[in-house]
Amino acid sequence: MRYVLDTNTVIAALNGVPSVTRRLASVSAGDVGLPVVVLAELLYGAHRSRRREENLVKIATLRQGVTVIPLTEGIAERYGVVRADLQSRGIAKSDFDLVIACSAIETNTVVITDDRALLDGSIAGLAAENWLA
């Protein structure tokens, strides 16, 4: 696995945004991971959507093609360290953003995101790219 996708990147892919679909087409499905919290966010969005069934089918298809990264003890430990470090520097991030970042760090992958909170360089050891820019 080389890449971990953030929710905004997955939504862009599901909506056919060319910059994202082009990049995803250039890598094998085995190189792409999806943190379980991203899956949770996608399912929440689908259940609130007017196109609930259509979106649930898209998510089910996506799940077949990528590895879903579970929340492990290593990710939990990393989360504690990273959140404490950020807090000591007066930096706040959402819990899910931190879990996504820690999933990428622990799996030695690059997080693909359009989220400034993950692109700002404040999380030590996090490699991040924006395929939407």
Image (cartoon, rainbow, N blue to C red):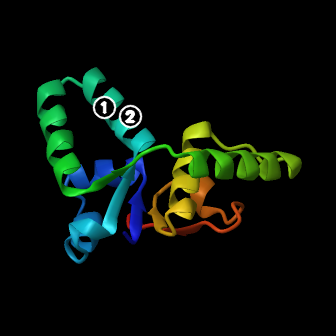
Q: Does residue 125 lie above or below 49 as drawn?
A: below
Please indicate whether residue 17 sits to the left or right of residue 86 in the image: left
Q: Does residue 61 lie above or below 50 as drawn?
A: below
Please tell me which residue lies in front, 29 or 74. 74
> Which element carries disc 1, helix, strand or loop?
helix
Three-letter amino acid code at disc 1?
A: Leu
Provide the residue designation for mark 1.
43
Name the residue rendered at 39%, 72% in the picture: 2
> Which element carries disc 2, helix, strand or loop?
helix
x then y, percent, for residue 89: 86, 52
Q: Are marks 2 and 1 in contact (CB under 8 Å)?
A: yes
Q: Does residue 129 lie above or below 6 as drawn?
A: below
Please tell me which residue lies in front, 118 or 85. 85
| Neighbour tally class for label 1: few under 14, some 14-19, many 20 plus, Cα within 10 Å | some
Provide the residue designation for mark 2.
40
Instruction: Calculate the distance from the C-alpha at mark 2 to the C-alpha at mark 1.
Output: 5 Å
Which quarter of the picture shows residue 32?
bottom left
Three-letter amino acid code at disc 2?
A: Ala
Q: Which residue in the rendered view is the most extreme toward the right?
A: 88
